[in-house]
Each structure stands twice: as C-alpha cells, then as structure tokens.
C-alpha cells in the first residue's frame, strides 16, 4: 500500500482477480466490481486507487473508503486508464489524475461503462470519437474520455479496429489517410480494409515495401517512403524453406515495383528523432513493432504514429487485447515513451512469429541471437 501525492489523499492497493477489498464493498450497492473480474487484467498492472474518509489516512489499511477506481494501463506506455469509479466519483478521478501527474504521465483515460459525459467534462475530460469498428474479441464501451496532462493538443484520427488478425498494416494506412483528409471516414470500412490488405500482403503479413507500394498505388498523390535498414526479406524466418522462397520472391517483386512507380526505399535506420520530425511536418508514420512489451507476446504488428507530446509519441493501435481487459480506449490516442517505442520497433529477423497476426496463439519466443531491423512507411501530405 502506498500514499500518492500531497494534495490528494489516496490509497493504492493491488487489484486481485476473484476478490474485492472489504472497503470497496462498503461503498454501497453497485454491480461494477462484478464486471471487473470478468477478464484477467493481470498483464496491465490492475490496481485500485481509493480515497479514504476523513477519519482515515493513506497509511490506515482499515480506513473506510469514500471512493475508489479500478485503474489499468498497458506496460511501457505513458497513461493510466480508469475502468470505473464508484462512490464519490469526482474524488476518485481526482486521485487518479494526481497519481498520473506524480508519475509524469501524459494522460488519463476513462472508459465509458458507467461514466457520464457530464461527470467526465466536470473532471476535465473530453470525449473520444466513437470507434468505427472494434477489433475481434475486444468489445469495449460505447464511449471513452481522455484528459491530457500537458499543454497543447493532439489531433484525433478516427479509430478503426482491425477486423481480422492480419490486416493491421492496411488499417494503419487507411486511418492515416483519413486523418490527413485524403480518405473520408465513411469510406473506412471492412471492404476498404481487405482491399488494401490484398494489394499489400505477403501472405498474410504486410511487409514494409509491399505496404508502401500498395499505399502509393491507392493514393498516387501521396508521397510515400519506405524505411527498411536491411536488404534481406523480412518476416519470414518461422516458415519452412519452401514457403520462405516464394514469399521472398514476392518481396523482391515489391522492391522492383517500388522502383518503377517511384517509391524510395531508404536503407538507413529510422530514428525516433526522425519519426518526431515527420510527425511535426504533418506526415504519418506506419511503424512495425513487436507486441512483446505492451501485450506480452512477440508478434510483429503495425501501428500508426501521428502525434507527439513531451517524452512520448502518440500512436493508434488497430488491435486491442480483449482477454486482458484491453479496449479501443487503450489503443486510441496511446502515448508511448520514446525509449519504449524505440525498443519495441527494433525487430528481430529470426522472430519465430513473422506474420502480422495479433493472435497470441501464433507467438513464440525468438530463438537465439538475431539480426535486427526497423521497418516503417512514411506517408506525406498529398501533392
């Protein structure tokens, strides 16, 4: 148990699946804790931030609570998420915001299971745009809210959750173009998702060159640059040799097509400074990352980098891990510290899972010491 901050008195206790603290039950009749236990949230550091009554201090474990919130977050990120708040809801939210500030985080989110727009606005939160689609198996709330803890704003792209385990590359490109105004949000649907994936896929992965070529063919006026600091085929090592051969041939064909239609393939390592620079110029960066840090399994996956705040890059992730209580509220406008994003986007060429599938059953630990690479696609403003 720990005390958080000096201006807001609070108690922080771990959240244990299958049981609830007595003080939580004493807050009165509510059915929220029952829902808290419907999934295993342990991968996202679940904890309860509680506000003790006037007669109790943060050091008093037996003090009655007047408010409590269940709080989680993806590992290696820069936010906290309120799943629900009960009791004196404004007091619980103030305690969570104070905790986030004390940790130097970029934002607090609030899932809209029980939060009302009025309560959220009174606490300084703004509504997130409802998702156009949610990823399979990760049904989240209809509403969500965010409160940034820094000066300035980050413009919000539409959120679209990939509807298959393998279309993350196509979805990030579509969302980037919708955010840039090149594609109307109404056109961002499953037909568009699967059509772009079909043009970009290396079966079933979307490797960087093929994805860049497909984006350029779909939007000829948009400048596209592929960043790939290896000249060998990628995302193939887990396949048998004969399956690697024809996929490698397709990747070489993509490189030839990139040269034919004028898509540069930059061989240098794309730094986080360069990613921030591209975002500052109004460009979008589709970045290949491993989900090992944020979700606990080493699966290559595409995310969209579209904003920057002090110390973190803001991404949109088209996939949410519903089995861990992860929803579109986590995946949308997600701040990731520069160092964390740098680490998770250094990919192993020997990763034993090399599809962009987000099914944890496909993942395995990398074998041995491997060569590494970074893959990205930068989409500039339309000419």
Image (tube, helix red, strand yellow):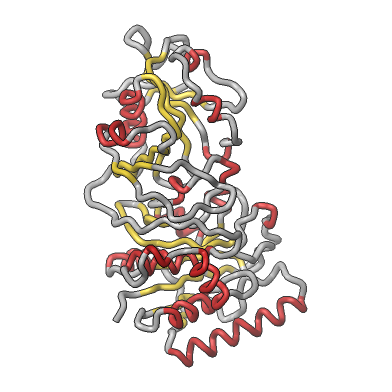
**How many badges with numbers are in the image?**
0
Q: In this view, does 383 lie above or below 141?
A: below
Percent position (x, y) of residue 256? 54, 90
User: Percent from the top left, x then y, of residue 223?
Assistant: 36, 80
Q: Where is residue 24 in the image (x, y as percent from the top left)?
A: 48, 17
Q: Quadrant of residue 266?
A: bottom left
Above-or-below relation of 126 to 285: above
Rendering quarter of residue 28: top left
For this orientation, the residue located farthest to the top is 55
Residue at the spot 55% in from the left edge and 25% down from the top edge: 34
* Residue 26 in sight from this viewpoint: yes
Whether residue 317 is visible, yes or no, is: no
**346 and 85: which one is in front?**
85
Which residue corresponds to the image point at 37% horizontal and 10% vertical from the top-left? 56
Between residues 110 and 249, which one lies in front from this camera angle? Answer: 110
- Image position, residue 117 (x, y; %): 31, 36
Examine the rendered structure and indicate whether residue 127 appears above or below residue 274.
above
Name the side, left or right, on which 370 lies relative to 191. right
Residue 382's place in the image compared with 371, above or below, is below
Q: Which residue is drawn at 67% across and 59% down?
A: 366
Residue positioned 36% across, 37% down in the render: 103
Q: Residue furthest left?
A: 151
């Amino acid at each position: 148990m720990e005390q958080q901050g000096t201006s807001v008195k609070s108690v922080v206790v771990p959240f244990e699946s299958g049981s609830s603290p007595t003080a939580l039950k004493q807050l009165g009749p509510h059915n929220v804790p029952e829902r808290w236990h419907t999934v295993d949230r342990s991968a996202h550091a679940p904890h309860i931030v509680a506000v003790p009554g006037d007669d109790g201090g943060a050091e008093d474990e037996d003090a009655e609570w007047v408010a409590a919130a269940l709080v989680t977050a993806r590992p290696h990120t820069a936010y906290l998420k309120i799943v629900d708040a009960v009791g004196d809801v404004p007091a619980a939210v103030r305690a969570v915001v104070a905790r986030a500030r004390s940790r130097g985080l970029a934002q607090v989110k609030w899932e809209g299971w029980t939060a009302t727009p009025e309560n959220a606005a009174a606490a300084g939160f703004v509504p997130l745009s409802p998702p156009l689609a949610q990823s399979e198996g990760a049904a989240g709330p209809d509403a969500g809210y965010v409160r940034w803890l820094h000066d300035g704003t980050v413009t919000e792209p539409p959120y679209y959750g990939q509807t298959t385990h393998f279309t993350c590359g196509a979805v990030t490109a579509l969302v980037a173009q919708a955010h840039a105004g090149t594609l109307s949000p109404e056109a961002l649907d499953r037909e568009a998702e699967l059509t772009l994936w079909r043009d970009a896929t290396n079966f079933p992965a979307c490797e960087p060159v093929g994805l860049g070529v497909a984006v350029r063919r779909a939007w000829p006026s948009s400048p596209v640059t592929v960043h790939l600091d290896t000249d060998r085929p990628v995302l193939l090592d887990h396949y048998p040799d004969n399956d690697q051969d024809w996929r490698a041939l397709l990747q070489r064909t993509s490189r030839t097509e990139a040269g034919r239609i004028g898509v540069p393939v930059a061989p240098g390592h794309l730094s986080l400074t360069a990613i921030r620079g591209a975002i500052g110029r109004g460009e979008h960066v589709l970045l290949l990352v491993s989900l090992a840090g944020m979700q606990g399994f080493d699966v290559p996956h595409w995310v969209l980098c579209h904003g920057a705040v002090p110390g973190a890059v803001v991404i949109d992730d088209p996939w949410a891990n519903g089995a861990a209580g992860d929803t579109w509220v986590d995946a949308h406008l997600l701040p990731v510290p520069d160092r964390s994003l740098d680490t998770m986007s250094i990919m192993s060429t020997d990763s034993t899972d090399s599809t962009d599938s987000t099914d944890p059953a496909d993942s395995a630990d990398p074998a041995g010491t491997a060569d590494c690479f970074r893959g990205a696609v930068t989409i500039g403003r339309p000419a």
